[in-house]
Structures are given as C-alpha cells and as structure tokens.
C-alpha cells in the first residue's frame, strides 16, 4: 500500500527533496536523508555475495513509561508477525526460500530489525523490512500468541541465575531509572499491556525522526535509497525521546537467595558514555582485566586457583552513562575466597597498572576482532547501525583502529583507577548468606 502510494506521486518527484546527510568520516560509506527525515546509509562491498539490511529504531527499554516496560521488546516480536499484505508464514517462506536470515533485537537504547540475503535477493529484504515498519497488522490473535511467547521468555530468564544476577545488578546500579529495567519487561507489564497501547507506542515512536536504514554488501547506494523510498518514503513525523541521565546514587548490595548449586556474583561500577574520550581506553582495560582467556581474572581465578568455571568482565556504554561489570560463579563454600581474590586482583590492577605485553595483547585482540568483523556484511551493517544510534558520524575503520592503537598503559591505569573508584554495586544469586559481604 505504501509502495503504491509513492509510485502514484512519482519517486523522482519525492527524491528531489532528498538531501545528502552530514559527511561521514568513513569515506567507504554513503549517506542520504530522505525528504521525511529518514537517514539511509550504505557500505558497499563489491566482492561480497550477500547484503545485510537493517532498520534501526532509536527507541529501547529506557524510553518506555514504567507501565509499558517491555513495549519495545514486544514490538520486536510483533512486527515480524505480519503486515496488511504479508503473513508471518509468508515472510518466513520468502526469506528462507533464498537461504536468507531475518532477526531483530532490543536493547536499552534501540531496537533493530534486519535481514541477510544473497545479493540477488536484497530488494526483497528491503521490501519486507519497509513493510513491517510501515504497515504492521497487529492482528489480535497474534498479539495474544506473542504475549504468551514473551511470558515464557521471561520465565526462562528467571530460571537462568546468571541472567537474574545481571538484572539485579542493573537495577541496583541505576535504581529507579529506566536504564536499570529489564528490557523484556515484567510478567505484570507484559500481561497488562493492551493491543491499543502497543499500537499507540509504535505510532508515537517508530517514526522517521527515530529511524536509520543501513545496508552493507554488494549493492549500489542510489538503488538502495530508491527501494527504501518506495516502502518508507511517505512515513512522517515523530519526535526523539527525551532521555534523563541516571542519578549518581547506587545501591551497594542485592542478594537473591535461591536453592541452586552455585552462587552467581556480579560486581558493577558506573562507566563512561558512548561518546566519552575514555571509552576506548576502558575497552582495553576491560580486555586486560577479564575480557578473554589471557586476562588477569581468567588466569588467576580459573587457571591458577580453579575457583570458578566462568569469570569475565565487560564494559557497556550508553548515551549518557555506562557500566563496568565483573561476573563469576562458584560454590557457596568458596564465595568468601572468591571475593577476596577478586578484591586483590582489582586492587593490583588499579595500583600497579599494566605491563606492555598485556597492553600489546589487548590492543591486538581488539583491533584484530574489529578487522575480522569487517569480512561479514552483517557485522559491517551492525557496526554502522549501532554507531548511528548514538551519534551522527561513523569513524572510518582506520580512525577506529588508530584510536585503539594510541591507548597507552598510562591511559589504562588512569581510566581503571577512575572507574573502579566509583561506588561498587554487588549482586548475588544462589545459596549465600549476606554476612559474607560484610
């Protein structure tokens, strides 16, 4: 229906009102802004045999009212259920008939819908994505069926203690703020959310002001722009959500007593935002601390002491905040020892800094992983989409790699000392007595 309406007014007439988007640092990318404000970015890979296309929506869990917690994730499920012209079955059959893939995911700050298809079939992917964003059906029986699927997903998460410990940590690190909410929502909010409320949330937020369309692979920019125009060119309106930074206060401890075999621990500190100058230095610090098998935590806690099966750290960055997290799981009788070793390693990390060899390994891993991710059209599409959810520009690969390589040992020690000096939050799930944290 949308495509027919655009054809009636003439694509050429509409395209006269398009404009080139702000110049991108990555000269391998091309960008055009449609007349209605939707930004379209392509990354051409002439030797690839696939095209990955994605519609990125700058709306996530933090943009929902508390009573609608989980609405973005609900829509992630619902939009692929079908449109006025397509059923969920026909969408799946069309994609699978050419060996393609389709999926979606929801985060605290954005939702993404994407396909990966052979290069001869990429137009079908754009048509499907455009259709589900322009004319979702919201059929009553499909809303109810998907509600039950999501409730099962929530139950599955609640039965997974390492999911629970991370959610408890988020709630304690961002108390009373939507960054701390479970992206899935709760059983109560998902049960109570009406079809009309979901449709209204979609109508208010899934509009051009919040949409970016990205593709990577063997395709031509102008042809891709024209295909997006035919499906989404008549969409209008929308206002970016107003986001409030989280307060500085955190909770120090969350304990959930569960009769399971292990105690799952997560330690968290406030980190840095996506555009912060220290983000790359914190990434290197994280890699050295607990980002891989050669990291300090893995080597000391698992390999040398055999205290755990799994131990790792990670850094997350949001628009206006961030988090640094350490996770480990062990038997109830070894929790005190695990905490003692963790504290000793963290103190040593801050006080003693890192060696040049550790720095070399961490930067080598991060730069190498970045380069390897560029071989896949899906990885390149996701890199651009994620970045444009936070800023208007995308660094070139060389700029990104140069920034990583420029991180020094002094940078790592400085940012580690800064972040790990923030108030610490601890969450624990399992058969543990709170006195161990005293």
Image (cartoon, helix red, strand yellow):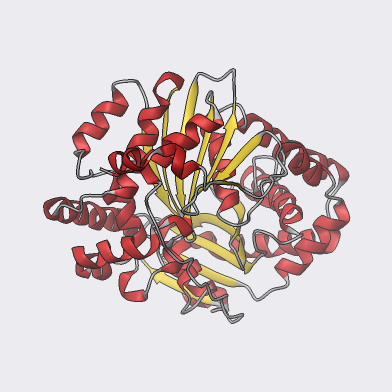
Pick whichever, 169 or 399, lies toward us. 399
Q: How many marks?
A: 0
Residue at image coords 35%, 29%: 124
Q: Say above or below: 354 vs 125.
A: below
Identify the image quadrant of residue 340.
bottom right
Residue at image coords 55%, 56%: 327
Pick whichever, 353 or 304, lies toward us. 353
Pick whichever, 77 or 416, lies toward us. 77
Identify the image quadrant of residue 345.
bottom right
Residue at image coords 38%, 39%: 10
Quadrant of the snapshot with the C terminus? bottom right
Q: Looking at this rendering, what residue extends furthest in the left direction?
A: 141
Query: Where in the figure is residue 220, as x and y percent of width and height?
Result: 54, 27
380 lies left or right of 409: left
Query: Where in the figure is residue 412, as x and y percent of width and height?
Result: 80, 56
Residue at image coords 26%, 50%: 78
Query: Where in the figure is residue 143, as x and y percent of width and height?
Result: 18, 55
Residue 402 seen from this side: yes
Residue 70 seen from this side: no
Pick whichever, 284 or 398, lies toward us. 398
Identify the image quadrant of residue 275.
bottom right
Quadrant of the snapshot with the N terminus? top left
Query: Where in the figure is residue 250, as x and y percent of width and height?
Result: 57, 78
Q: Say above or below: 79 vs 184.
A: above
210 lies left or right of 134: right
96 lies left or right of 264: left
């Amino acid at each position: 229906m949308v495509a027919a309406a655009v054809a009636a007014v003439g694509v050429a007439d509409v395209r006269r009102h398009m404009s080139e988007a702000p110049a991108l640092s990555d000269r391998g990318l091309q960008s055009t802004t449609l007349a209605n404000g939707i930004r379209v970015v392509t990354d051409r890979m002439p030797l690839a045999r696939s095209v990955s296309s994605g519609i990125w929506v700058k709306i996530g869990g933090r943009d929902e009212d508390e009573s609608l917690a989980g609405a973005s994730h609900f829509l992630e499920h619902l939009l692929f259920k079908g449109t006025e012209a397509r059923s969920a079955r026909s969408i799946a059959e069309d994609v699978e008939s050419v060996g393609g893939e389709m999926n979606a995911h929801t985060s605290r700050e954005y939702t993404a819908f994407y396909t990966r298809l052979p290069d001869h079939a990429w137009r079908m992917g754009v048509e499907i994505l455009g259709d589900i964003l322009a004319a979702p059906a919201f059929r009553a029986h499909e809303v109810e069926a998907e509600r039950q699927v999501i409730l099962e997903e929530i139950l599955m998460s609640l039965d997974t203690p390492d999911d629970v410990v991370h959610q408890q940590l988020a709630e304690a690190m961002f108390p009373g703020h939507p960054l701390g909410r479970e992206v899935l929502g709760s059983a109560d909010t998902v049960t109570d959310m009406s079809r009309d409320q979901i449709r209204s949330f979609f109508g208010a937020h899934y509009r051009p002001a919040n949409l970016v369309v990205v593709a990577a692979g063997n395709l031509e920019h102008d042809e891709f722009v024209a295909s997006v125009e035919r499906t989404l060119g008549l969409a209008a309106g929308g206002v970016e959500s107003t986001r409030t930074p989280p307060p500085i206060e955190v909770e120090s401890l969350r304990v959930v007593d569960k009769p399971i075999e292990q105690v799952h621990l997560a330690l968290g500190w406030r980190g840095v935002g996506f555009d912060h100058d220290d983000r790359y230095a914190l990434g290197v610090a994280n890699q050295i601390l607990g980002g891989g098998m050669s990291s300090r935590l893995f080597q000391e806690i698992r390999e040398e002491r055999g205290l755990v099966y799994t131990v790792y750290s990670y850094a997350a960055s949001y628009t206006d905040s961030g988090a640094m997290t350490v996770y480990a799981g062990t038997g109830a009788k070894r929790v005190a020892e695990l905490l003692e070793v963790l504290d000793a390693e963290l103190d040593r990390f801050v006080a003693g800094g890192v060696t040049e060899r550790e720095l070399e390994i961490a930067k080598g891993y991060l730069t190498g992983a970045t380069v390897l991710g560029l071989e896949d059209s899906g990885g390149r599409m996701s890199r651009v989409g994620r970045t444009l959810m936070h800023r208007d520009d995308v660094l070139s690969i060389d700029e990104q790699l140069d920034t990583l390589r420029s991180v020094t040992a002094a940078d790592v020690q400085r940012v580690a000392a800064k972040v790990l000096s923030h108030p610490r939050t601890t969450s624990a799930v399992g058969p543990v007595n709170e006195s161990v944290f005293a």
